Image (cartoon, grey):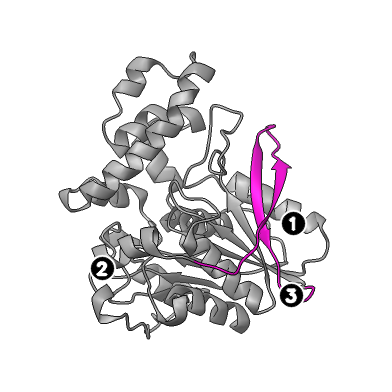
Amino acid sequence: MPILQPTYKPPFWAKKSFVSTVFSGLARKVKGITQTRERITLPDTDFLDLDWSYAQQRSNKVIILLHGLEGNAQRPYITGTAKLFNDNGIDACAVNFRGCSGEPNLLFRSYHSGATEDLDAVIKHILTKAKYTEIYIKGISLGANMALKYVGEDRDIPKEIKAVIAISTPCDLKGSCDELLSWKNRHYAIRFLGHLKQKLQPKLIQFPKNLSITDFNSIKTLKDFDDNYTAKAHGFEDALDYYKKASCLQFLPNIKLPCLMINALNDSFLSAKCYPVKEAKQNSYLFLEMPKFGGHVGFIDKGNVYYNERRALEFVIEN
């Protein structure tokens, strides 16, 4: 598909990647949305918490929202989308990945960029409700990689799934990790690692045979975390094996339903391979937008409705 020409024009003060990224993550507030929590049990006996919000009128459409690394369903990039879709007659199911809903999950494993088995469980649960004939998926960052991997894998996609929107997608996890480990992103990397290690610490006591204090203390970088925990907990050989197998880039040629990817050119988290121009040009189902500005999930726009949220709604209406 030809590359789409973006129309995003940020406020003058939000053109720098750092400003738009940090403001959107720490300062943005979204009001006027009510979420209702539902807990589902996964096939491996663990649980996921889903935070639902609803359109005023009964709807047969729902959008599944997937957050990013160490996010949750209350992050403004999730609630902003949920509110916009609710206001336009579409229900929203905001997924909290394992251990991200404010309560530790039950197993040694947790979540990762390629854990499409959990997304599959959510979709199957939603289909049991029988009220939804149209399901859309919007993923942010880690959640975007998961969403695209899900629809590109060798599986039967339920006919109810109509389209996917992926925002600030780290298509190539190795490249994205390298970017996060670079000096320019040190403040982000330190913050992410702090949250991850804090959440991992209770598992030292809960699962002493799976994780030693030596392993825990050796975690100094995000890659160390993936070597010592993510890979071991989820069946990968090491961090590089995880990055290779979980990256959605390799699955993009197999996608057979409309997918919109919006990756800002000034997103400091993304490497060159995270802009899949060749794959988009060769797949009529893959639509790629590369705005000049926007940082990482920082598409600030008028009226507290972000550009990526408006484009997501437009894409859903079109498909």
Per the image, the residue denoted by label 2 is 266
Is 179 on the left or on the right of 109, as rendered?
left
Q: Is residue 23 above or below residue 292?
A: above
**For the residue marked with disc 1, what is the amino acid?**
Ile
**Secondary-structure class at tag 3:** loop
Q: Is residue 139 above or below residue 234?
A: below
- Residue 126 tag number: 1
Badge 2 vs badge 3, beta-carbon distance below 8 Å: no
Which circle's residue, 2 or 3, is located before the other in the chain? Answer: 3
Which circle's residue, 1 or 2, is located before the other in the chain? Answer: 1
Q: State the separation of the CA atoms marked 1 and 3.
A: 19 Å
Residue 56 shown in magenta: yes
Q: Is residue 169 above or below residue 85?
A: above
What quarter of the picture does the N terminus occupy? bottom left
Residue sitting at the far top: 209
* Residue at horizontal 51 percent and vertical 53 percent from the top: 146
Q: Is residue 206 above or below residue 294?
A: above
Q: Position of residue 48 (x, y in %)?
A: 64, 43
**For the residue marked with disc 3, what is the amino acid?**
Gln
**Secondary-structure class at tag 1:** helix
- Write down the region rendered in magenta: 30-58
